[in-house]
Image (tube, rainbow, N blue to C red):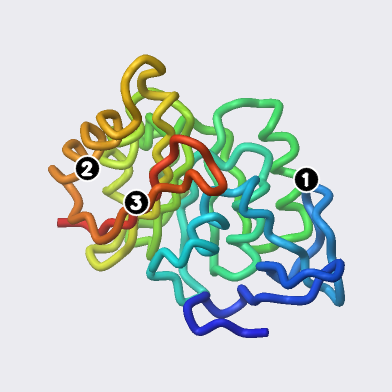
Amino acid sequence: MSDPALPDGVERREIGGETRLATRGPAVYGEPTADGWRAWDPERSKLGGMFELGVDTGFAGGETVLYLGAASGTTVSHVADFAGPTYAVEFAPRPARDLVDAAEPRDRLFPLLKDARKPRSYAHVVESGVDAIVQDVATRGQAEVAVRNRQFLADDGRLVLAIKARSEDVTAAPADVFERALDRLRETYEILETQRLDRYHEDHLGVVATPR
């Protein structure tokens, strides 16, 4: 069942007796499947949560994507199912091994064992002018990571970012953490939309932005 608000390749499908957000591809994290489609669990994916909440990410399908903080491949595998070439940056070796497994049957998914805080280390691999950066990096300085990686983003591209308040400051109010991060982002990006993701991810803020 198609939804005009979703990019091509992301649909709402009947899976396990429920209408679920889904992409077409091999399963990665034990998610239920039906007829070649696999459920996209918004409680395990910030981007999936943003789609479920109706955030306008700017995705149409087929984009070239730089994904920062790919972890074991839960979300980035869904992205590669509907996008074009998808570069997946993950620093921790253990989840990166799972990411490689998720990429094996996906010829558009390119795992990179790199640190998203150091874009120079993968600048020779990632093409410039990507259509979208998706970021889910659970570290202090999340806005700074987005600013440093702006060099890869097309001037009309989109940053789709999930800010985790507790990764920045466990003692501060999440709203204050988010505002500080947005202030840093505004130095490089124009903020198009923000949305609290608490329905699926407590103390997270979804952000969509475009380069200034």
* Three-letter amino acid code of the residue under disc 1: Asp
In-image side of 9 versus 25 (left or right): left
| Cα–Cα span, label 1 and label 2 | 33 Å
Left or right of 130, for residue 29: right
Give the percent coordinates (x, y) of residue 51.
51, 64
Query: Which of disc 3 and disc 1 is earlier in sequence?
Result: 1
Quarter of the image where the C terminus is located: bottom left
Q: Is residue 150 left or right of residue 136?
A: left
Q: Which residue is mark 3?
A: 207
Query: Residue shown at 28%/48% (left/top)?
Result: 150
Residue bearing the label numbered 1? 101
Return the residue nearer the eye: 89 or 203: 203
Q: Quadrant of the N terminus?
A: bottom right
Are circles 2 and 3 on residues that touch, CB within 8 Å?
yes
Q: Residue, x 47% and y 78% (percent of image)?
A: 5
Q: Which structural element holds mark 2?
A: helix
What amino acid type should be assigned to the residue bearing mark 3?
Answer: Val
Q: Earlier in the sequence, mark 2 or mark 3?
A: 2
CA–CA distance in space, label 2 to label 3: 10 Å
Q: Residue at x 60, y 70 (%)?
A: 82
Q: Nearer the viewer, mark 2 or mark 3?
A: 3
Residue corresponding to mark 2: 185
Q: Element at badge 1?
A: helix
Instruction: Identify residue type, mark 2.
Output: Leu
Query: Eyeballing the image, is 66 above or below 22?
Result: above
Question: Depth check: 124 or 169 in front?
Answer: 169
